[in-house]
Image (tube, grey):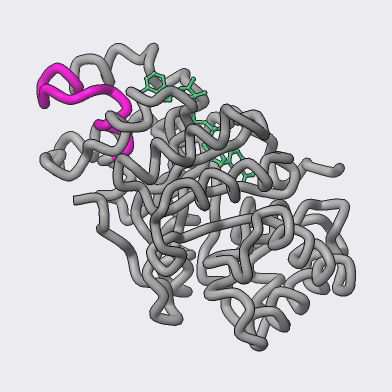
């Protein structure tokens, strides 16, 4: 089944697996990807206002015939929209583009210096009004989370981070777990680089699974929500086929051991748009 989920600290259930849609073109490409994903059993879609495809995501959701209650839809406030009033506006604009009345999760996309606390207050207001089911952050390192927590009334339910065998950040995972912040992986397939690793090929052969299935299964066994991206129907379907096997503790440790602190995306400490 594809309906496995982690429970967020406010009781909301977040599906283990979602479809990422970064760089999926607004229009036919993203509409189809979302439709195929829902058909394959995904219930969770990860978009952002900066992806400029919320309209297409919304259209795919409507075509799918899956009831809104069964969908888990995530978007993010972009850096340029950070601040209290502008975030309130950005949320409404995302809803409008998606054609939705609420999101399941709304995230601060990046910890923009000097802005993210005000932005968080806006998310807290939207949450208090019952207009979003959960709120969280993305790309927050421990020091940024600690700083946010000095003033936050609501502890973020999620931290969405770059996460794959080359960037494990186990201390950050442990810190988030200690605060009941659900960890979520972006670029779980290392933006495609994972497919070149010999050790992944060997492990995939050993289990009779694909490399994508092995690494996504590792995410789940580490307690991490994961959102692989694809716009190809066969890959969308096969990436979700990870619930019929289990990695041994030794193999989980082997993947953990590949860590080299390597990022394929920007560093949250040096990201200034
Ligand atoms: P990813 O690690 O999911 O890799 C995607 C690429 O892998 C695809 O373009 C495709 O070419 C390839 N691929 C997918 N399935 C495959 C398969 N079965 N076989 C061979 N190749 C396959 O990369 P991503 O898109 O960067 O990350 C996933 C999602 O995370 C994004 O779409 C987005 O939703 C989210 N994200 C969030 C942030 C953030 O700052 N919060 C940043 C980047 C991405």
Q: x, y (%) of residue 231?
A: 49, 27
Q: Depth check: give the residue in front, 49 or 144.
A: 49
Q: Depth check: give the residue in front, 195 or 236.
A: 236
Q: x, y (%) of residue 215?
A: 31, 33
Q: Is residue 30 above or below residue 17?
A: above
Q: Is residue 196 above or below residue 11?
A: above
Q: x, y (%) of residue 176?
A: 48, 65
**Which quadrant, please, contains the C terminus?**
top right
Quarter assignment of residue 241: top left
Q: Is residue 252 above or below residue 10?
A: above
Principal secondary structure, stretch drawn in magenta: helix
**Is residue 30 located in the magenta-colored stretch of the structure?**
no
79 relative position to 123: left or right: right
| Residue that appears at 38% across and 64% down | 70
| Residue that appears at 38% across and 26% down | 233
| Residue that appears at 70% across and 74% down | 123
Decide if residue 150 is in sight here. Answer: no
Q: x, y (%) of residue 129?
A: 66, 87
| Count of numbered circles in the view | 0
Magenta stretch in the rendered image: 204-216
161 relative position to 5: left or right: right
| Residue that appears at 33% across and 44% down | 219
Q: Depth check: give the residue in front, 27 or 23.
A: 27
Decide if residue 175 is in sight here. Answer: yes
Quarter assignment of residue 66: bottom left
């Amino acid at each position: 089944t594809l309906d496995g989920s982690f429970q967020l600290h406010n009781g909301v259930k977040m599906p283990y697996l979602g479809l990422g849609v970064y760089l999926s073109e607004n229009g036919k490409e993203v509409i189809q990807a979302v439709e195929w994903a829902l058909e394959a059993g995904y219930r969770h879609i990860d978009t952002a206002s900066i992806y400029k495809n919320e309209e297409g995501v919304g259209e795919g959701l409507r075509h799918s015939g899956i009831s809104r209650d069964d969908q888990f839809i995530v978007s993010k406030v972009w850096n340029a929209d950070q601040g209290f009033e502008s975030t309130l506006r950005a949320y409404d604009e995302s809803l409008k583009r998606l054609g939705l009345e609420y999101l399941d999760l709304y995230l601060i996309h990046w910890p923009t210096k000097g802005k993210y606390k005000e932005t968080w207050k806006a998310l807290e207001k939207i949450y208090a009004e019952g207009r979003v089911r959960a709120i969280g952050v993305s790309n927050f390192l421990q020091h940024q989370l600690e700083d946010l927590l000095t003033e936050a009334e609501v502890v973020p339910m999620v931290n969405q981070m770059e996460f794959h065998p080359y960037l494990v950040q186990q201390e950050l995972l442990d810190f988030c777990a200690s605060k009941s912040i659900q960890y979520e992986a972006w670029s779980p397939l290392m933006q495609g680089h994972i497919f070149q690793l010999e050790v992944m090929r060997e492990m995939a052969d050993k289990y009779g699974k694909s490399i994508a299935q092995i690494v996504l299964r590792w995410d789940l066994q580490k307690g991490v929500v994961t959102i692989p991206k694809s716009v190809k129907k066969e890959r969308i379907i096969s990436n979700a086929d990870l619930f019929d096997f289990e990695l041994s503790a030794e193999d989980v440790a082997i993947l953990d051991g590949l860590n080299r602190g390597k990022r394929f995306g920007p560093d949250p400490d040096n990201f200034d748009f």
